[in-house]
Amino acid sequence: MNDASVFATVFLLTGMVLVLGELARVLVMGDKLGERRPRSPIVVEPHVAGIAALFVLIYVVPALVELGRHAKVPDKASGAALIAVVVTNLVVVASVIPLLAVTGRNRLADYGIEPQGWLAEIRCGAIGYLVATPIVMAVLVTMSSFRSAETEHPFLKMLSGATPVELAGVTAAAVIAAPLAEELIFRVLFQGLLQSLVPTWLAILLPAVAFAAMHGRYDAIPLLPLAIVLGLLYYVRRSYVAVITTHALFNATFLLLALHGRG
């Protein structure tokens, strides 16, 4: 490994140890993970439904079309594409969260977006990670004959010969920007609205399938168990912090495995 890869590895491992160590501490001490904070039912507002429909057109429809076309996985992404993805995801988060609260009919806390109780939700997110990751790994092992280096995500392909700046960008995209934006879209926005409109199982499953499909034909099936666990976690806790934690830990794990594989 080069110096940048070692730094990224230490950064990712430190974050994972802090989160999982806190969970272990609470379980050993016999403390409560954290009581679920009360949430009011989400009122479906026209502007929020419109935002959700827009993201369906931007993220879900193109992904389903690509799945149907059996499109080839793109080659290694460029540095410009990486920057664009990070910036776009952060802009989505900065734009959508204020829009969820502009009318006042729903509090941000009703969507699970609040600073109170964040540590308890991180602990619950760690449990979600421990549940989802072995299942995904088992699916990946089962599907190993259908996967190769050519089917990897374009950002993971960047890790071979990546500069320190590119490696930092991949880390930021995978562990920070993607969990923030994707959980806001698929769990808080999509699932949050659907839970007020359809049966619970369907409200969990539809965003999960959309989330998995967005990641392409080779990752869709392995990521479906993760998406379902994220949906169940959001239903049980209705916490943005909890699902971000699960997603970030999961991405950090596979980024570490990819770095090690190229070490």
Image (cartoon, rainbow, N blue to C red):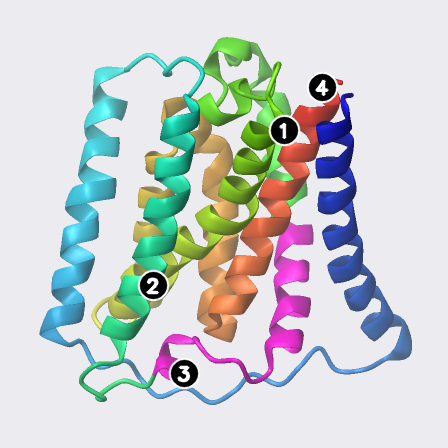
Q: Earlier in the sequence, mark 1 or mark 4?
A: 1
Specify the label residue 37 is tagged with: none
Q: CA distance from mark 2 to mark 4?
A: 35 Å
Taking the image as drawn, is residue 109 in sight?
A: yes
Residue at 60% across, 72% down: 121
For marks 1 and 4, give the one nearer the viewer: 1
From this viewpoint, which residue is outermost toward the right?
Answer: 28
Q: Which residue is mark 4?
A: 261
Task: Say whether residue 110 is left or right of residue 36.
Answer: left
Q: Main secondary structure of the magenta part?
A: helix
Q: Position of residue 44 (x, y in %)?
A: 18, 76
Task: Say whether residue 257 is left or right of residue 231.
Answer: right
Q: CA distance from mark 1 to mark 4?
A: 17 Å
Q: Secondary structure at mark 1?
A: helix
Q: Which residue is mark 1?
A: 164
Specify the label residue 94 is tagged with: 2
**Amino acid type, callout 2:** Ala
